[in-house]
Amino acid sequence: MEGSNTPSKEWHLYTEIFKARKDVNAVVHAHNPFTIGVTMIAKKFKPVTAEASMILKGVKILPFKRPGSEELSKMVGKNIAGRNALILRRHGVIGIGSNLDEARAVVEAIEEDAIVQTVMRIFHKSV
């Protein structure tokens, strides 16, 4: 690796995505608080908003693996086919795209949908 900046300890994870998906030019990895919270109690992530339903393709929640571990990297590489997002339980989200704007839009759509799901759960219990 070249340059003066130290790469993220999760650079292996990104490498596995690029190996598995030749069509991907950008990866966004974020620690979305609402998504993490919703998926700690849910077994699946099913979008409820129109936007998320149109943008997201088969989002899967992966079991917790230590951040930066080879085990996490391999698991992500094996599960990214046919998807544009993955949720890493207790960790965060990964969005991919042909460019950074697409990958960022995926991550934002997941978090916005998780916020709506949270609001739905709050009001459903109070009705």
Image (cartoon, grey):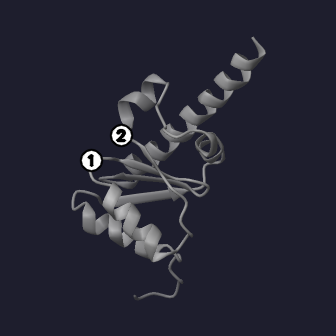
Whether residue 26 is situated above or below residue 123 in the rendered picture: below
Q: Residue at x 67, y 25 (%)?
A: 121
Residue at the image position 30 percent from the left and 66 percent from the top: 18
The reply to whether dot 1 and dot 2 touch (C-beta < 8 Å) is: yes
- The quadrant in which the C terminus is found is top right
> What residue is shown at x 34% (from left), y 54% (from top)?
99
* Disc 2: which residue: 58
* Closer-to-camera residue (45/116): 45
Residue 95 in the image: state x and y as whole percent.
43, 51
Give the mark, 1 or 2, whose residue is nearer the N terminus.
Answer: 2
Point out residue 111 in the picture as x, y percentages from the top left corner. 56, 40
Q: Position of residue 76 (x, y in %)?
A: 39, 61
Q: Which residue is mark 1?
A: 82
Mark 2, other Cα within 10 Å: few <14 / some 14–19 / many ≥20: some
Q: Which residue lies at the image location 60% right of the left edge and 27% below the top edge?
A: 116
Determine the secondary structure under disc 1: loop
When the figure is inspected, residue 39 is found, relative to residue 16, above or below; the finding is above
Circle 1 packing at 10 Å, graded few (<14), some (14-19), many (20+), is few
Identify whether 17 is placed above or below 100.
Answer: below
Amino acid, disc 2? Gly
Please state which amino acid type lies under the numbered disc 1. Answer: Gly
